């Protein structure tokens, strides 16, 4: 796990939007979703 993945999770919690969080984190939405999935499992 990387620190940026936790930052991704915080961004998702704040925005409640995968697409908006991905945009703010400067990654594609599919890549952002994979990072969140990695945290889940």
Image (spheres, grey):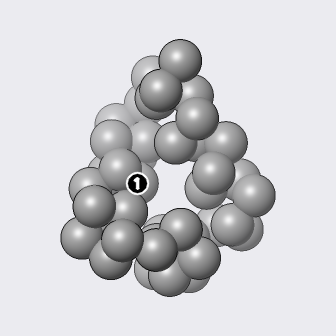
Q: Is residue 41 above or below residue 33?
A: above
Expressed as whole percent of the image width and height from the top left, the position of residue 10 reads 26, 56
Q: Tag 1, which secondary structure?
A: helix
Taking depth in this image into account, of 2 and 9 the one nearest to the observer is 9
Q: Position of residue 36 (x, y in %)?
A: 52, 42
Q: Residue furthest top?
A: 41
Image coordinates of residue 2 in percent, x first then y, are: 43, 30
Q: Image check: 39 left or right of 11?
A: right
- Left or right: residue 34 compared with residue 24: right
Task: Tell me where residue 30 sits by quadrant.
Answer: bottom right
Query: Circle 1 sits on which residue?
Result: 8
Write down the quadrant of residue 16 in the picture: bottom left
Residue 26 makes an appearance in the image: no
The answer to whether 23 is drawn above or below residue 9 in the figure is below
In the rendered image, the vertical position of residue 16 relative to residue 39, given as above or below: below
Residue appearing at x 28%, y 61% in the figure = 13
Q: Is the residue marked by circle 1 packed among few (<14), some (14-19), or many (20+) residues within 10 Å?
A: many
Q: Residue at x 24, y 70 (%)?
A: 14
Q: Provide residue 21's location: percent of width, then percent of height.
A: 46, 72
Question: Residue at image x 59%, y 76%?
Answer: 19
In the picture, the quarter occupied by the N terminus is top left
Q: How many marks?
A: 1
- Residue found farthest to the front: 16
Q: Is residue 5 above or below residue 17?
A: above
Residue 3 visible in the picture: yes
Q: Residue at x 71, y 53 (%)?
A: 31
Left or right side of 39 for 16: left
């Amino acid at each position: 796990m990387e620190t940026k993945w936790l930052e991704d999770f915080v961004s998702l919690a704040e925005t409640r939007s995968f697409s908006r969080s991905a945009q703010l984190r400067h990654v594609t939405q599919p890549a952002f979703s994979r990072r969140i999935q990695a945290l889940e499992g």
